[in-house]
Amino acid sequence: MSEQKDLVPVEENWRARVFLLGGAVGTALGLLSAYLYVRAAEKTYGDEAPQAPEPRDAVKLGMLLLSIVRTITEWGSRR
């Protein structure tokens, strides 16, 4: 039987790389989301402040984010 090689080499500093990559991706997505939100609000409301999101919208967003975190956690459990 042939020996199966890992797709990602195991290194001692893999944890630091994961944290740095996760932080960079999270920051980039957060900034992009904020930019798109502001752009859409300015287009709709002009210089006025937009209406605050309703609680049900915040709950929906929270559930979606938990789903994403759960999927990423499952990736770490794969063998």
Image: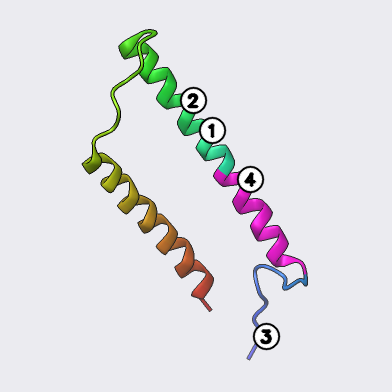
The mark that comes first in sequence, 4 or 1, is 4
Residue type at mark 2: give it. Tyr
Q: Position of residue 43 (x, y in %)?
A: 36, 12
Asked if the residue at tag 4 contacts the one at tag 2, i.e. Cβ–Cβ closer than 8 Å, the answer is no
Question: Label 1, on which residue?
Answer: 31
The mark that comes first in sequence, 1 or 3, is 3
Asked if the residue at tag 4 contacts the one at tag 3, i.e. Cβ–Cβ closer than 8 Å, the answer is no
The way the protein has been coloured in the rendering is rainbow
In the picture as drawn, the residue positioned furthest to the right comes out as: 12
Q: Residue at x 50, y 75 (%)?
A: 77
Question: Label 3, on which residue?
Answer: 3
Question: Label 4, on which residue?
Answer: 24
Residue type at mark 1: give it. Leu
Tell me, yes or no, whether the highlighted magenta stretch contains residue 33.
no
Neighbor class of circle 3 (other Cα within 10 Å; few <14, some 14-19, many 20+) is few
Occupied quadrant, residue 49: top left
Asked if the residue at tag 2 contacts the one at tag 1, i.e. Cβ–Cβ closer than 8 Å, the answer is yes
Q: CA distance from mark 1 to mark 2?
A: 6 Å
Residue 64 lies, with reference to residue 7, above or below; the image says above
- Per the rendered image, the range of residues in magenta is 13-26
Question: Label 2, on which residue?
Answer: 35
Q: CA distance from mark 3 to mark 4?
A: 35 Å
The mark that comes first in sequence, 3 or 2, is 3
User: What secondary structure is marked by label 4?
Assistant: helix
Q: Position of residue 79 (x, y in %)?
A: 53, 79
